[in-house]
Amino acid sequence: MKLTPVAKKQLVKILGSASVLTDELSLALYAYDCSLSRTRPEGVLLINKCEQIAPVLRVLHQYHIPFVPRASATNHAGSCVPLQGGVILNLTALDHVLEINTKQQFALVEPGVITADLQERLAPLGYFYAPDPASQRVCTLGGNMAQNASGARCLKYGGTLDHVLAADFVLADGTEVSLSRQDAGPDFIGLLCGSEGTLGVLTKLKVRILPLVKQVRTFLISFPSLQNSVEVVSELTAQGIVPRCLEAMDKLTAQSVEAFSHAGYPTEAEALLILELDGTLANIERETQLVEKICRHHKALQVIFAKTEEERQKLWKGRRNAFAAMSRLAPSVMVGDGTVPRSNLPQALKRVQQVLQNHHAKASLLFHAGDGNFHPHLLFDERNQLQTVRTTRVLREILKICVDEQGTLSGEHGIGVEKRALMAYQYDVDTLSAMARIKQVLDPQNLSNPLKIFPHQFTEKAREPMALRLNVQVLQDTLLSYIRAKEPFFICGQNSQLKTKASTLLSAKTLQEIIEIDTANYTVTAQAGVTLNTLYKALHKAGIYSILPDGKGTLGGAFCSGKFPEFYAHVIGIEALLPDGSCVHYGGKLMKNAAGYHLTRLLAGSQGTLGLVTQLTFRVFAYPQTVLKAKPVQQKSSNFLWKRIRDGFDPSHLILNCKEEKARA
């Protein structure tokens, strides 16, 4: 529906006439973001107070008017472009830091707060906010959550989804929802991170803040080839060294950045690494020796470190200005952000360089090397249609290489419109259908940032599903038999939590295989029925460590029961059977994945109400970690979003829970 005079009148009543814009200049100014996409809205709504969002959305819902929430619009994938017209919700005025609590280590902010502004408020207090996107001088915290942006420090501290403690959120129909990490059930905050505004609008965020690290050492290392530099990344990971940041750039990038920022980068080397360590002085000294040894082994030309804070900031100023520096070399710059497992980085890089050579494309290669996140900057002239088509084709080939190398289309920029067709290259029908079902359940009229993320007619184009292991196939057949017979059933692991005597069980007890312990990427892939005791023994034998305790429970139980919510952040891949018998696969050995909805977080803590988790991939460590303590499980499946998602995934309520078993009895 269009922005009718009647709807406009109601919006003016809520916002005031000066905040409802329909003039030609305003529509033109809000027709684009940092991508190639250009589509004009029918109106622009300037939101000045968080309290205005819910009533505005109720009006838009009443008249079926689509909307796109946006602030700085720094997105590179077309996530902020209004593909169906409708209205833009401009949230830039929602820029208040409402509270900083250093005692409890959180900041309460509105979604339009600029990321760097929060950092500047925290620094004098001796604190910092860990996510640090390169665009932090202009990007907002709400936008960071929408894309699950992270930046250089993601390697050690995780992405935005790991630092949002609570969020106030308004669904497309105007329903207001408050979410907290303390809630029982699925991690809906994690699900919203990276949803690109397609599930509603953020109104407030409570984010974790951390004490400033007193000991930081920043290195600048030069190499005779980019290949040498990425080999260092792989070996650092294999040695169990987790730098605070690890950034790589090629010669073209270094030369451009140096000309623009005068950061002190050597311009003759073929590649540079910026590597940063933090922690205790003893650890930094120990890791410094290993870093220097590994870099020299891979033919490093120089290994120098910043002697003062001023020198350190100068090095980072150059890195953060990379996009601006590259934009001086051509009228247009197209940026990708595919991600691969760190061990696959050298092979992926070779293939990417070959594609650039084959197409005679000019590009700089810049990436968060520590987490395998490529940021190729492709130079072209958007006014030249042939160049634009060719550059788009080159980026598509690069992203396909990332998927082929067990990676993903996006580490932090999202999918938007410009990568949505490639989602069918990454995911099978079952996985895309599950994501589409989440969108349908939470936004049935498809009003919130419509036509983003999901490829058109994906059921015909999606990749072939992965072959299931025999024991998973047997469980899928059992599940389908329950569905055909309309027979209610329980999902459990060893039945130690549920303790049901029902005969209709879908149990992970047969899923007892540790599939891979990967010491190159420090990940483990194991089936959900593996006991924590078995897992502990296997990791001990391999000389690596997990944050999970040993015990009689299962891996799937630790993830799904809600007893270990801190474990969610370490789970990076999942396989699960859903209530309709479909099997979804999400993630893998990836430190980042912003391609579609975060299905691992949806199933985390779901207590068997949304399906049976059959396999997990999670991070492990080279050194002993603080082991988690179990928390009491809250048997609560009545919260609003949990109930709505459950009704959408299992409308017949064939999957029973404890309360329903008592009711049947």
Image (cartoon, grey):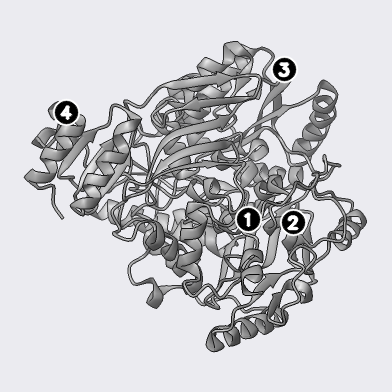
Q: Which of marks 4 and 3 is nearer the N terminus?
A: 4
Tell me the mark number nearer the camera, choosing from 3 and 1: 1
Q: Which numbered disc covers residue 558?
A: 2
Q: Quadrant of residue 5?
A: top left
Q: Which of marks 3 and 1 is nearer the N terminus?
A: 3
Q: Is mark 3 on a helix, strand or loop?
A: loop
Q: Earlier in the sequence, mark 2 or mark 1?
A: 2
Q: Earlier in the sequence, mark 1 or mark 4?
A: 4
Residue 649 in the image: state x and y as whole percent.
Answer: 49, 68
Q: In this view, does 533 lie to the left or right of 516?
A: right
Residue type at mark 4: give it: Gly
Q: Which numbered disc covers residue 214?
A: 3
Residue 160 in the image: state x and y as whole percent.
Answer: 54, 39
Q: What element carries label 2?
A: helix
Give neighbour class at mark 1: few <14, some 14-19, many 20+ (Cα, 10 Å).
Answer: many
Given residues 471 and 593, the one toward you in this image is: 471
Q: Quadrant of residue 245?
A: top right
Residue type at mark 2: give it: Ala
Q: Is residue 19 left or right of residue 590?
A: left
Q: Which residue has dot 1 on it?
A: 604
Given residues 353 and 87, the one toward you in this image is: 87
Mark 2 in CB contact with mark 4 (< 8 angstroms): no
- For image coordinates 19% across by 35% down, the residue present is 29
Mark 3 in CB contact with mark 2 (< 8 angstroms): no
Q: Which of marks 3 and 2 is nearer the N terminus?
A: 3
Residue 50 in the image: state x and y as whole percent.
Answer: 35, 31
Q: Earlier in the sequence, mark 2 or mark 4?
A: 4
Mark 2 in CB contact with mark 1 (< 8 angstroms): no
